[in-house]
Each structure stands twice: as structure tokens, then as C-alpha cells.
Amino acid sequence: MSEVNQAKVGFAQRIDKLTPQLLIFPTVLIILFLAIYPLLLSAYLSMSRFKLVSGGFELKFVGIYNFKKLFSGSQQYHFLGTFGELLLWEWLIIALFIGSFCYWLVRYFASGKASVIGGIGRLITALVLSALTLLAFSVLNGTGHPGSLMVTLFYVFVGVAIQFFVALGLALLCAQKIRGKHFFRMAFFIPIMVTPVGIAYAFRMLMDMSQGPFAPIWSMFGLAEFSWAADAWMARWVVLIGDSWQWIPFLFMVLLAAIENQPKEQVEAAQLDGAGSWRVFKDITFPSIAAVAATAVLIRLIEAFKIIDLPNILTNGGPGIATESMTLHSFIAWRTQDLGGSAAVGYSLLFVAVVICVSFFNFVGQRTVAKGA
Amino acid sequence: MRLLKKSPTFNLGKLAAGVTAASAMVLALGANTVQAKKFDGVTVNVMTFTGPQIAEPLQRHAPEFKALTGATINIITVPFSDLYTKLLTDFATGTNSVDAAVFAPQWVVDYADPGYLQDISANVAKDKALEESDISPFFRSFSTQYKGKTYLLTLDGDFHMIYYRTDVLKEAGLAPPNTWDEYLAIAKAVNGQDMNGDGKPDYGSCISKKRNAQAYWAVMSIAGGYLQSQGTSQGAFFDTKDMKPLVNNDAFAAALHIYKETSKYAPADEINLDVGDTRGLFTAGRCALTIDWGDVGTLAIDPNSSKVIDKVGAAMLPGSTKVLNRDTGKLETCTATSCPHAVDGINRAPYAAFGGWSGGINAAADDKVKQAAYEYFSYVSQPAQSNKDVTIGATGFNPYRLSQFNNMQGWLDAGMSKEAAENYLGAIKDSLNSPNMLLDLRIPKNQNYQQVVLDTALARYLAGEIDVNQTMETIEEGWDELNEELGKAEQLELYKATLGL
């Protein structure tokens, strides 16, 4: 073969090799433009001070100033919360938590299966969980006040846990051979189709103790002059109940589909062998729906971090800043032209959400999938 | 051929007829053009807050203005908490979807300096129908001008005052409060009484305290009498020597204490009540006292909603017998030197809170749109419209023209008794004429100082999250931080300028 032909073949082979990359290049470009570019731009924004000037805006680089304000400056109370004094027993529990995270890390590194990526991931998870434990005890101990970070975590962990168990219960009920189950399925699914703003306004009306539809009932119990909106924890629970009402249907539908796909032969065999309902659920139903349940919970976790409509409309973030989620905190900062501060809150939210969701995916989701498989 | 022969004749005939018809049409069009309205085809997008106050009269007058001029006025409303930013973003990014807006005159500093607002000085000077000289000098200057130029047209006059139930106080043998201590004492004395005959206990005081709303002015209404005693130019927000915030001292502590204390005699959900809610409660006869703008006076005479017609009194904001010594940060009893404007030893500082809704025009709008926007604001502000609007509670417009203060007939026609009208207008006039009137903050980013830092700290204080000292420290730290970010020296100069120093 002549040198020219060899060169032609070589070029063609290189093109062949590059074809997959060339074909996905436009998609990569779109992703870069739509996802990565805004992410990088907002990262820069979080380190800048935004100012509107004639004909446009001015961005002044301020380094980590916006983050410093959130973690140790004038906005610390807003983001992390107001720290209370910790008692000896609280320190001991914190130490116990941090000790168990350390033990988990040491066990991983001593297992002989440790990898660099896995090690770094676990280290970050342990550090974040330790910091959040310390923060939780500091701001929730009666003398402190939680900031938007801890309030968000309350909505995420407590809210998703409640939603999961209620949805699971409803799904198990609707999977039974009961009359009108199709109606119940439809009825349970309606809330997710209602706009969050509508739900917030509906709950605001329902929770009006003096003029709402339940006013006579509250009045009967002497609660007409009670205002849930004036109490921090009551207000947070009302927001959480509204959020649960909206999102239980999502988990319900996914879990119901999973339950209806469980191996019926195994269930019937177990029942014939005299297994009780709990035993059937524990040994057959739950393992068979675990993978789907973990995925649904992960999706819900990601969504829960972004809660804004309900606290914004129900309570305006109040009383004080008691019901402000991180997204609402970021939105309020944005609304006041503090785009740098808003982006800093947004990035902090992204970091916490990614660490928790990736950790959940790696340490719960994958294992559940593996077991389910 | 015949056809060919005939056809030119026929065509010529048709042509002649056509030309005649066309000429007639042109003439007719010409006539129409003469009758065409000045702003036919012009649409002006005007942004204001959701209201229903303020938006209501703007929407109501829009069809009238269209009939007169042909201009379509499109009123866009957004929540109050979003208004400042929506406008700023629209102007600054060059979106310019808003041609004109009705907003707080305080914000003019942030809109005029970068050149977003049209200088309307020349229009105002030529506008005889506006009758500018009839507008009270304070609203004519403070609410409309910035750095010697006119950027806004006044549509509303705002002062914080107190309102009280004349029947409730009379029955209790109490006089309207002159000091904030008396305010608390009255609220405490009458709290729990049935004030509207529905058999339910009512409230001693109702003050809007909702976060992210229009509540944060009330605390300065209380603090004013403690903080400012040397006249309007002394100011009550910052020390004019060094821009030190006047929010961490005995005077502000006293105001915060009173502010929170009033909640003891108020509805349980007072911290969630916006001004619309407290007005509703007051006019429903459920409150003995309230702090509000002029709206309550006119809402109280609305026969459709008010249960307190001719049972409402208005008065200048109460004051204090003690005022702040700015050198020591302590409260001291009024003397002739420390309180030159005190009456009976009580120093009052009526607060020109907000200043009154005013209309401004986007400098980037088309010339014809700008002219239509100006003429629309002028139309709404002209005595023929505004003298009636200020007597209607739903408008949110309060008196700002001299004729509105002097001509009693309009108020009597609206349903106010002569006594009530004199009392109501007298309270506003007293506030307006006070040499110790407290001016609202009008420095760059004043919205951040008040609507963000002050408002959030107050909300946390009312929620019991922080105590008086922490609240004062939080506000001071936040205001100091803003001063540093924006340049303390520049802010001080601009603050002094707004006080006429």
C-alpha cells in the first residue's frame, strides 16, 4: 500500500474512532451552555457584589465575603441560626455521633477495599454530617434558634420521613382488594396536581383560627384566639403538613405501583404457610419495593431541598425567620438586589443537597438496589 | 369591439366615480384626523403594587383618560415587597417593559441617579391644569424632587397618625393619648371590651406588624418622639456628625419596648397582619387604637364596610417627655433646650412615613409614551379627580393639596361629619406643620436599610427570637455594614442633604 493510501486509511480510522465523540459533541455543548455555564456564572456571582448602574450592572469581585457573611458575619443568624449554650450531656451526644462517623470511616479504610474517590466521598460525608450534628444541637437546644439551613433540613428529613410512611400506609391499603380503591387512588393523587401556590393559599385559609372554615371547631376548644403563625414550631409544622399533603401522592403512586408488582406467588405461598401480614411485608413486600422506594425517596429529597412556595405564602418566612427555607432565604436576598448573597445561599444549598443526596444514593440507594436485585 | 368601444367610456365613468369616492374618503379621513385624539394608539404600562389601594384609582381613571386622549393605560400590579426590585431590574437591564410607575418617593434616589427616571421639571412648569401651587409645599418638594429636579408627580400624601375610638374612650373616661405611655395605658384599659356589639371581646390596639409588608414604619413612628427633638433637620435615623445609626440607645430601646408591649392588647396573630388587615379590624369596630396612614379616616366613613362611622378620632402621633441625649445614648427629661418644640413638656415628631405614592416615568420610554404617562399622572393628580379620590377610603390616596385641607364640602359630601372632618384634617395639618416633623429615610438603598435590615430584625424581635438589645445590635450592625458597602462619607452627605443641611 502506498504511503498516500496508508495516510488515507489512518485518517479514516481516526475519524471512525472520533465519531462517537463528534456525535455527542453538540449535546455536550448544549449541556455546557445550559447547565455548566449558569453554574459557573452563579459561582462567580456568589463571590461578587452586584450593583445596578446606568445602562446595566456592575460586578465587583469580593472573594469569599458573601460566604463569610453567612457563616460568621451579619447573616450568620439567618443562615446557620443563633447558637445556644450546649450542656455537658449535649456535648456527649455530639461526641458520640462524631465518634460513630469516625468509626465508620476507619472501618472503611481498614476494610482493604478503600479507593481514593470512595475515601474522599466518605470523608466529606462524615465532615458534613458531623458539622450538621453540632449545628443541630447548637440551634435546637432551646436557647438557640435555627437558621434557614436547619429549617430546610427539618422540612427535608422530617417531611420526607412522614411523607414516606404515610404514603406507604396508603399504598398498602389501596393495594388490598377493597371496594372503591380506584376512587381512592384518584382522590389521593389529586393534591400533586394542584399548584403549590394554590395549596399554600388553601392551607392559609384552612389554618385561619378565627375566620377559616374550621373556626367553629377551634372556637369550641377555646383556640379562636390562638395563632399558630405566632409560634415558630407550630408555623414550621403547618408548613410541613402542607408540603406533605402535596407530596404524599407522589410517593403513594410510586409505592403502589411497586407493591402491585411484587411477586404474588411468594406472597400467596407465604400466606398458605401461615405467615402473618407483618411477616409478609417484612420479608417479601419491602425487599421487593425497596429499590423503587429508595429512588422515590431520593427524588423527593432533592425536591424537598427546594421548598419555597409554602413558607413564602403561608407565613412569609415568619414568625421572624422561623419558617424560612434556604431557597426562600436566597429568594429574599435576590429580591433585595443582594445577588451575591443570594448566590452564596444557593451554592451552600447545592453543596448540602449534593452531599446528602449523593451519600443517600451511595450508602442507601445502591445497597437497596443491590439487595433488591 | 362594442365592448371595446364601450369599455373606455364605462371605465372612465367608473374611474370618475372612484376618484370622487376616494376624494370623499380622503376628506372624511381628513376630518377624522382633525378629530383624532392626541394619544391614539399609545399604550402606557404603569406598574404599582397590588393594592387594592392605589391600583384602584389608577385603574378607574384609565378609561376616562382614554376617552379624553386616546391613550391606553395598562396598570400592572406586583406585591409591595417586589415593587422596588421589579422596577429597578426592569430599568437597569434595559428591559423597559414598564413605561411609568407609582411607587414610594423614597426610592427616587436609586432610580434617578442612574438616569432611569425622566426629569419632568419642564412639564410641571408648563402644566397649568396640575395646579401645582395647590399641592402642599412638603409633598411638592420632598416627595417629587431630587437634586433640584422634579422626577415625580404627587398622587398621595402620607403621614403616620394614631386613630382612636371616640365612643370607647369616652365611655372609659379617657382622653386621646399624648404620649406612648398613655397609648399603652388606654390600650390596656379597654382591651377585652366588646367594642362593636357582637358579644365578643375586642382589642386595645391593632398595629400591622407583618414582615415583608408595610409594617416596619410603625416602630419609627414610636421612636421619633424619643429620637428627634431639635427640629426636622436633626433627623432620627443617623447621627449627622458621623452617620452612626441611632438604633442602639435608650430611645430606640424604649420604642421597641412599647412596640412589643402593644401586642399584649392586640389580636393573637398581629404579627401576621398587614395594613389591610388592621384597617379591616379597626373599621369593623374591633380595635380601640391603631397607627396608620390617612386611609383609616376615609375607610371609617364607608357605609358598606364600616361599623365605626363618626366614632373615630385622629391625632398626631404621641410623643415623649424624655428624649435622647445623643452624646450619652441615654434618655433625659425634656427641657426648653433639649425639646424646643415640645408642647406641655411632650416632644412629638410626626412621621412623614413613606411620603405618599408618586408617579415617575421611565426615561427610556418613547417620547409619546412619556408624554402620555405624564399627562395621565397629571390628570389623576388634578383637583377635579384627586379632591374626590382622597375622600374615598378604597383609593389609598390621602390629602396632599391645600384645597383638600381647606375645602370642607368634599369631606361632608363623602359622608364625614363636620366634626370628624375637622379632627381628621386637623391631625394631618398638625403633622404637616410641625417644625419637628420626622422625614423618612431617603438615601441610596434606603429600601435595604428599612425593608430588609430593620424589617427582619423587628420580625425576629416580635417572634421572641431576640431581645431588645440583640435587636438594636442587629439593626446597627446591618446599617453599619450597608454604610460601609455604599461608602459612609457619601451616604452621610446624601443623608444631610435630605435634611436640608
Image (spheres, helix red, strand yellow):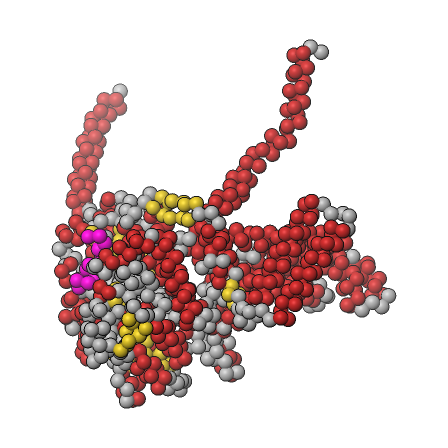
Looking at the rendering, the stretch of residues picked out in magenta corresponds to: B135-148
In the rendered view, does A298 fall on the left or right side of B378?
right
Work out whether A105 lies above or below A7. below
In the rendered view, does B280 fall on the left or right side of B318?
right
Determine the residue positioned at 35% across, 86% down: B189
Query: Split into 4 quadrants, where in the image is the C terminus of chain B?
Result: bottom left
Determine the residue positioned at 54% across, 54% down: A349
User: Based on the displayed image, in which of its 4 quarters is residue B248 positioned?
Assistant: bottom left
Q: Most extreme residue toward the top, as rendered?
A: A2
Residue A19 visible in the current orientation: yes
In the rendered view, does B55 fall on the left or right side of A2?
left
In the rendered view, does B173 fall on the left or right side of A67?
left
Work out whether A158 lies above or below A66. below
Of A196 and A21, nearer the camera is A21
Query: Split into 4 quadrants, where in the image is the N terminus of chain B?
Result: top left
Residue B386, percent across and down?
Answer: 21, 63
Residue A160, percent across and down?
Answer: 62, 62
Of A219 and B35, nearer the camera is A219
Determine the residue positioned at 72% across, 58% down: A103
**Picture mark count:** 0
User: Based on the displayed image, in which of its 4 quarters is residue B424 positioned?
Assistant: bottom left
User: Based on the displayed image, in which of its 4 quarters is residue B288 positioned?
Assistant: bottom left
Residue B375, percent across and down?
Answer: 21, 53
Determine the residue positioned at 62% across, 31% down: A21
Residue A321, percent across and down?
Answer: 47, 65
Of A280 and B237, nearer the camera is B237
